[in-house]
Amino acid sequence: MDDAIIKTVVIDKVDCKETKTSKNNKQYCSVGIEVNGKWYNGLMWEKQIDTAKQWKPKDELMLIFFQEEYQGKMYSKFKLPTKENLIQEITTIKKDIVLIKEHLKI
């Protein structure tokens, strides 16, 4: 998942499937979202399920997008960013700002 990107998008459609229980007794829900005509799939676990069930078209969401291979085929996926993901993104942005300032000699 090295090519993952955090992006804020507006969803066109959302399809939140029924909640199921995994083998280790945790609840999950398969969710599909359409963004700019392209579908992405993700799994929402436990507390995330309530969040995903509230999504509707035209909602603006910050998500992590990535490609995942399954049985030799690539799939477009998404997941909710964690606190650590957001801290890493902020750190990267701060480093970029420093480089830009150095380039502009500010």
Image: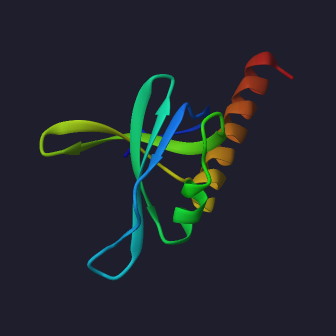
Q: Residue reaching furthest right?
A: 106
In the image: residue 90, left or right of residue 17:
right
- Is residue 22 shown above or below 55? below
Query: Residue sitting at 74 percent across and 32 percent down?
Result: 97
Q: Residue reaching furthest bottom?
A: 25
* Image-quadrant location for residue 72: top left
- Is residue 95 shown above or below 80? above
Which residue is at the front of the view, 87 or 62? 62
In the image: residue 45, left or right of residue 9:
left
Q: Residue reaching furthest left?
A: 71
Q: Quadrant of the C terminus?
A: top right
- Is residue 98 shown above or below 49? above
In the image: residue 36, left or right of residue 94:
left
Query: Residue sitting at 37 percent across and 46 percent down?
Result: 1
Query: Residue sitting at 39 percent across and 78 percent down?
Result: 26
In the image: residue 4, left or right of residue 10:
left
Give residue 86's position: percent from left, percent from top: 63, 52
What colour-coding does the image apply? rainbow
Which residue is at the front of the view, 94 or 69? 69
Q: Residue reaching furthest front?
A: 18
Which residue is at the front of the view, 78 or 21? 21
- Is residue 46 shown above or below 58? below
Query: Residue sitting at 40 percent across and 61 percent down?
Result: 18
Give residue 69's position: percent from left, percent from top: 23, 43
Which residue is at the front of the view, 71 or 32? 32
Give residue 31's position: percent from left, percent from top: 43, 50
Tally of marks: 0
